[in-house]
Image: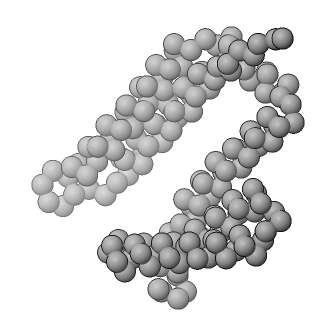
Amino acid sequence: MESKSKANFDALVGIVVAVFGLIYLLAAYLLPRSTVGSPLSPSYFPFLLGGVLTVLGILLFLQSDMSASKQAIKDLKKMDKKEKANTKLIAITSVACIVYGVIFNTLGFVLATFTFIEFMLFLTNKKEMLKNTIVSLCFSICIYILFSRFLGIILPPIPFLNI
């Protein structure tokens, strides 16, 4: 029996985390300035978080074994069908989460969450479309009512209905 060594993606993860940290730093810089007290007060924690992410990403990249990371990337091509399907599902889920974040304010909580959950349930259970739709719709509406009416947490409303 051949034993599989654990894939080492440290170099790739280090680069991704460092780039994300830099983007986060830029977004922190673009935050509106405070009119009361120190103008940069709202930016201190985001600056700190972006800086820490960037430094840790660079450190992870520098300490990583580049040859092991290159080998892990090459081994991705040699995966069996089940591993490829799982990796594809993870990638699609990651992209769906990013799209959800982008459309959240535009479509409002209920529509964005309904769309996201419907899509995710479709990926995992294509046969039960009616059940998926009912679950997605009920969850989105119930959570919206719970948060906005009972907990007093403001969520983006449905744009054209303004509810």
- From this viewpoint, is residue 159 visible? yes
Across the whole image, how many numbered discs are drawn on residues? 0
Q: Quadrant of residue 124?
A: bottom right
Compared to 115, does 75 lie above or below? above
- Residue 66 falls in which quadrant of the image? top right
User: Residue shown at 69%/44% (left/top)?
Assistant: 90
Q: Residue at x 48, y 72 (%)?
A: 143
Residue 70 visible in the picture: no
Q: How is the image coloured?
A: one colour
As rendered, which of 95 and 128 lies closer to the eye? Answer: 128
Name the side, left or right, on which 19 lies relative to 118.
Answer: left
- In this orientation, which residue lies closer to the viewer: 102 or 97? 97
**Most distant residue in the front direction:** 1
Camera-side residue of 124 and 16:
124
Residue 67 image position (x, y, % from top left): 68, 11
Instruction: Tell me the quadrant of the picture where the N terminus can be found.
Output: top right
Task: Indicate the position of residue 144 as horizontal and vertical percent values.
Answer: 47, 75
Q: Position of residue 70 (x, y in %)?
A: 71, 17
Residue 47, image x, y percentages: 33, 40
Name which residue lies at 83% across and 37% down.
82
Residue in the picture at 56% in, 72% down: 139
Query: Between residues 76 and 40, which one lies in front from this camera angle?
Result: 76
- Compared to residue 81, the image places residue 150 above or below, namely below
Residue lying farthest to the bottom in this orientation: 161
